Structure formats: C-alpha cells, structure tokens
Image: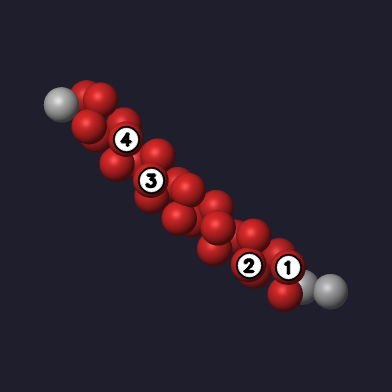
Amino acid sequence: ELHRSNSFTGEKLREKNLSWVDIFEEIP
C-alpha cells in the first residue's frame, strides 16, 4: 500500500511540476 501511495504522490508531483514549468515559461 505504501508503494501505491508513493506512486500516487509522485504522479501528483509530476503533474504539479509540469504546471509550474508552464507558469515559469509564461513569465518573461
């Protein structure tokens, strides 16, 4: 179960990371 939870958190972090990259790319 711990592994599953870790995988889920990693996926969420990756999604957030992509969002942050998009935001930073929009900032000149």
**With respect to residue 19, does 10 lie above or below?**
above
- Whether tag 1 and tag 2 are in contact, CB under 8 A, the answer is yes
Label 3 – label 2 distance at C-alpha: 17 Å
How many neighbours does mark 1 have within 10 angstroms: few (below 14), some (14-19), or many (20 or more)?
few
The residue indicated by pointer 4 is 7
Name the residue type under label 1.
Answer: Glu
- Picture coordinates of residue 24 (x, y %)? 71, 65
Q: What residue is drawn where x is 64% and y is 60%?
A: 21
Label ID, residue 11: 3
Label ID, residue 25: 1
Label 1 – label 2 distance at C-alpha: 5 Å
Label 4 – label 3 distance at C-alpha: 6 Å
- Whether tag 4 and tag 2 are in contact, CB under 8 A, the answer is no
Residue pushed farthest top? 2
Q: Answer with mark 1 or mark 3, whichever residue precedes in sequence.
A: 3
The residue indicated by pointer 2 is 22
- Picture coordinates of residue 22 (x, y %)? 63, 67
Residue at disc 1, secondary structure? helix
Residue pushed farthest left? 1
Q: What residue is drawn where x is 64% and y is 69%?
A: 23
Dividing the picture into quarters, in which one does residue 28 lie?
A: bottom right
Label 4 – label 2 distance at C-alpha: 23 Å
Q: Answer with mark 4 or mark 2, whichever residue precedes in sequence.
A: 4
Label 1 – label 4 distance at C-alpha: 27 Å
Label ID, residue 3: none
Q: Give the side of residue 23 with respect to residue 10, left or right.
A: right
**With respect to residue 17, does 27 lie above or below?**
below
Q: What residue is drawn where x is 34% and y is 41%?
A: 9
Residue at disc 2, secondary structure? helix
- Picture coordinates of residue 1 (x, y %)? 15, 26
